[in-house]
Amino acid sequence: MNSFSLRRAAGLLLVGSLSLTAVACSEAADTGAAGGKVTISVNGQPPQTQPFDRKVFDQDVAEFEAANPDVDIEPHEGFMDPKTFSAKLAGGQLEDVFYAYFTDPANLIARKQAADITEHVKDMPHYDAIRPELRDVFSKDGKVYGVPTANYSMGLLYNRALFTQAGLNPDQPPKTWDEVREAAKKITALGGNKVGFAEYSKNNQGGWHFTAWMYSVGGQIARQDGDKWVADFNNDKGRKALQHLKDMRWTDNTMGEKQLLVIEDVQQMMGAGQLGMYLAAPDNVPTLVNQFKGDYANYGLTGIPDGEGTLIGGEGYMLNPKATPEKIKAGLKWIQWKYLNPDRFEKNLQRYKDEGQPIGLPVPPVADIWTGELAAKQAELKEKLATVPVANFKSYVDATPKGKIEPPNAQQVYAILDNVMQAVLTDRDADPAKLLADAEAKVNPVLAQVK
Amino acid sequence: MRRRVEENLVAYGFLSAALVCFAVFSWYPIARGAVLGFQQVDFVSDPTWVGWENFERLFADPLFATAWRNTLLFTALALVFGFVVPFLLAVVLNELKHFKAYFRLVVYLPVMLPPVVAALIWKWMYDPGPGLLNSALRGLGLDGAAWLDSADTSMLSLVIVATWANLGTATLIYLAALQSIPGDLYEAAELDGASVLRRLWHVTVPQTRFVLLVLLLLQIVATMQVFTEPYVMTGGGPEDSTVTVLLLLYRYAFYYNDFGTASALSLLLLLVLGAFTALYLRVTRKADA
């Protein structure tokens, strides 16, 4: 056979099944010797290349084990990689507690690849104080299959230094798409290959950001029609959003020559001081500083333009469908203690502060997933311990567009919508109306598969 | 018969390790993949037999036809460039009197670069803004091209990279074939007053026919499996102009986790490549006869 992908998949499958046998044997031996102690494997351990995050994680594991002598944690490096997930599951290599992006739970639940933990979360402290729309991501038909631990919502990230150079006020960032367009013109006019605004259009990231555009103008990608899902972007809102993007690209020439960009390309442009604005979640800011040698003082974040709605995403943890009830119980205890623990808000923030890590950005260590009193307590602590110019991110925090989650079968839908973005950004004669009509015809069969 | 087996026992002994490796890592996955093409798997419950459903899903996917069209276009373009250019280069190299070794090394250098690195370097060269190629074109007073950023030029741009990356190997094989041609054939042709082009057509081409055929077939089989360049450089875009069969297969397997459909697609690819191989065998048998 000449398909290396298939060979690789099948190879993984094979290696996996051999390992499964090995694991099964070793587990049988464990039960006899452990004497009531539960061992759970968890992923999410940061790699050695991130020494600070790694140290925090390892300290937490030690502290948790000391407080819970009946649980033994076996940490595994890394997060969810959809490319290897199935092979790991097939080979019995999937951790008992595993990380999942918001895009994945719906499919994992449909394929029965996550354990039903409905009964277990009833005993979980503060579960009800988590924002309901985030809990919904991990639930279906009244049953719970995981818990959210962090979330983001999309805003507009901008370069304060370039704003100043271009004669724009960095404390009054654009609030609408029209203002973004005007600001982009001024930044591009600085010359020296400066790009006013950049947008993704490859590897499903174009579709992802088109979704953010649709939400920002009050539209959506899919809607429920009875018990079916149908596409809902081939309309005035979709055409207007695309036309706006097209005008910025070809009429204003404010989006640079190079297209088919992905997130790393755009971050590199921003880190190099070549880019004025792009749509991003707050977690991009530490990346720009740490990986691209940027400076916190140079970046600002504001709410998504037009502000009719914003794309929310995030992460959470789910449990292996093959895990025993004891392991599930221990796993949830770990998740609650490590990620969903209001008693440790202050300690976590202080620990980050002591190590010179940024505090005050709208990102973890304490994630913005709470409602009511817990949310207020967290905000208060963050302000008290802030180490970065919080004012640069205030307009993002103050903006409160309605958060909307990603459409069902998101990755397949995004793959189709990539084309729409690519066409507008690479073809001067692209017709937004036709592109959306074509994409609708392709997206509907994908949505029809949603159960 | 039995005696023959006994005589070869030692040989079989030496072969056994390789056979086991082939069985475990090559043949079993192939067989498993073929079965998977007719199944649906979630890796939690047992696989379910779905018959031709995976194939039906493929045929209903509008990208299916696009991927085949793009792959055939890539193969055709890659043959035009990847077949002719190295051959001409080998002829020129063969005629060189000085610095032979140096030029051979220079031609072979790109092959030593890992394919992903080559793709990334070319991605930077193709940058329509400050990229190397457009900077050079503008330096000459010409307009820059969109290269990867236009559906009209994206495939050609990928073919150039693939040809560049594989040029060295093909050139060296041609060169070896050229050097095996007896010198007296050329001398005789020269005495008869044949020009350079006539010598090329009447001596070089017939003498290297078999190598040319083998490489042609090998190139068809290899280029139909193009993956690295579109995966790294365009992700299949713009507007699906560089989605190839293997890229689509990869999407089914690792974006959608639909291993059944991915396997079905790989079976179809196997059939097509198998047809080319059968053709090759037939042609070479005829050539031998």
Image (cartoon, rainbow, N blue to C red):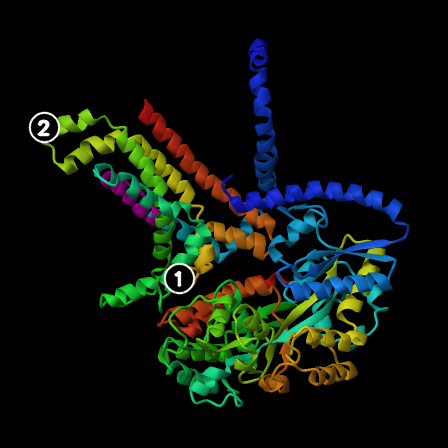
Q: Label 2 marks which chain's residue? A: B
Q: Is B246 located above or below residue B275 in the figure?
A: below
Quadrant of the rendering where the C terminus of chain A is positioned: bottom right
> Label 2 is placed on what type of residue?
Asp
Height in image: A318 above or below B16?
below
Q: Is residue A99 left or right of residue A234?
A: right
- Residue A325 shows in this picture: no
Work out whether residue B18 can be spotted.
yes
Q: Looking at the rendering, which quadrant does residue A275 occupy?
A: bottom left
Q: Position of residue B204 (x, y in %)?
A: 22, 33
Q: Which residues are magenta?
A: B77-92
Q: Nearer the viewer, mark 2 or mark 1?
A: 1
- What is the number of the mark on residue B192? 2
In the rendered image, residue B271 lying in the magenta stretch gets the answer no
Task: Please name the residue shown 40% across and 52% down the image.
Answer: B69
Q: Is residue B84 magenta?
A: yes
